[in-house]
Image: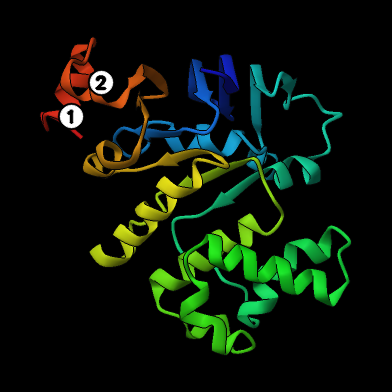
């Protein structure tokens, strides 16, 4: 399997707090990798380092290596605008912009210099179709995105991410605020998208990890305790802490 992302001896501090401790983890291309663990264990912190979201936090110190396609993204010379086009992010709460459905999806391409209406029309339609939303909104593309249901808003945020043609999609608990039907739609969508994209997802829902993830990493108190094929990690965990967590003894 080809690795898309490689973390080697990655450490991160928020001031005095050591939030990530010598994390070594490879994320495989065109697969879904889930990060599980109790709250505050470092999984979302690690996810956000993958497109330099930590740049917005004061007092953060990072050491170690973090490469995407063998390029060290922690290098200060890396253009974060280009990085975040390549590595898109979808957050826990759907966060559509207060504009039309069309303009939400066209927003990224416009920022990156695409002005041609026909080209934008094609990108919007393609992205909404990829996000399994087009059929539901085709007749109201110019109405406010805030009128969509929570599940539709989250799929719109995925479409907005896809519109700039990323290679990696990061999702931070994307279904935690959604009902079971909307959750199922998002999960089915991610299973389809992995043919074209490398996907990393933080989830508190271990059943979700077993349903959709090819690989799973278990984080605990800033450490990446165990990583492997999802089926193996859940059926034959190598570390007792992993076993205790997945069997509900803590967390």
At 73% from the left edge and 27% from the top edge, which residue is drawn? 73
Secondary element at tag 2: helix
Kindly identify the residue that appears in the image at 79 percent across and 46 percent down: 81
Q: Residues within 10 Å of mark 1 (few under 14, many from 20)?
A: some
Q: Nearer the viewer, residue 168 or 13?
A: 168
In depth, the one of 43 and 105 nearer the eye is 105
Estimate the spatial distance between the alpha carbons at disc 2 and disc 1, rounded to whole Å: 9 Å
From this view, report whether residue 78 is shown above or below residue 161. Answer: above
Q: Depth check: give the residue in front, 243 or 234.
A: 234
Tell which circle, 2 or 1, labels the residue nearer the N-terminal end: 2
Q: Residue at x 64, y 42 (%)?
A: 53
- Disc 1, SS: helix
Q: Which residue is mark 2?
A: 233
**Image spot of residue 24 (x, y percent):** 50, 14
Horizontally, residue 27 falls left or right of residue 85, namely left
Q: Nearer the viewer, mark 2 or mark 1?
A: 2
Task: For residue 189, say whether it is visible.
Answer: yes
Q: Quadrant of residue 160?
A: bottom right
Position in image of residue 179 (x %, y %): 27, 67
How packed mark 2 is, by other alpha carbons closer than 10 Å (few <14, some 14-19, many 20 or more), is many
Identity of the residue drawn at 35% across and 18% down? 228
Residue 145, position in %: x, y? Answer: 56, 80
Q: Nearer the viewer, residue 140 or 61?
A: 140
Give the labeled residue for mark 1.
246
Left or right? Give the position of 1 relative to 53. Answer: left
Q: Position of residue 5 (x, y in %)?
A: 60, 24
Q: Quadrant of the C terminus?
A: top left
Quarter-wise, where is residue 141 in the image? bottom right
Q: Are marks 2 and 1 in contact (CB under 8 Å)?
A: yes
């Amino acid at each position: 399997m080809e690795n898309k992302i490689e973390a080697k001896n990655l450490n991160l501090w928020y001031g005095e707090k050591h939030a990530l401790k010598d994390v070594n983890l490879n994320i495989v291309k065109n697969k879904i990798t889930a990060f599980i663990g109790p709250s505050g264990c470092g999984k979302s912190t690690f996810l956000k380092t993958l497109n330099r979201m930590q740049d917005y936090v004061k007092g953060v110190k990072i050491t170690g290596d973090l490469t995407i396609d063998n390029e060290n993204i922690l290098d200060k010379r890396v253009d974060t605008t280009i990085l975040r086009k390549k590595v898109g992010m979808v957050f826990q709460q759907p966060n559509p912009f207060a504009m039309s459905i069309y303009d939400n999806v066209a927003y990224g391409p416009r920022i990156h210099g695409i002005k041609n209406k026909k080209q934008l029309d094609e990108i919007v339609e393609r992205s909404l179709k990829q996000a399994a939303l087009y059929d539901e909104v085709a007749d109201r593309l110019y109405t406010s995105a805030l009128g969509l249901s929570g599940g539709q808003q989250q799929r719109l945020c995925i479409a907005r991410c896809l519109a700039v043609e990323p290679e990696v999609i990061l999702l931070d608990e994307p279904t935690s605020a959604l009902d079971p039907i909307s959750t199922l739609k998002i999960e089915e969508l991610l299973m389809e998208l992995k043919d074209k994209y490398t996907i990393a997802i933080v989830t508190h829902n271990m059943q979700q990890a077993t349903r959709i993830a090819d690989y799973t990493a278990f984080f605990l108190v800033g450490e990446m305790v165990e990583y492997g094929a999802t089926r193996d990690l859940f059926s034959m965990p190598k570390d007792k802490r992993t076993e205790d967590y997945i069997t509900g003894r803590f967390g």
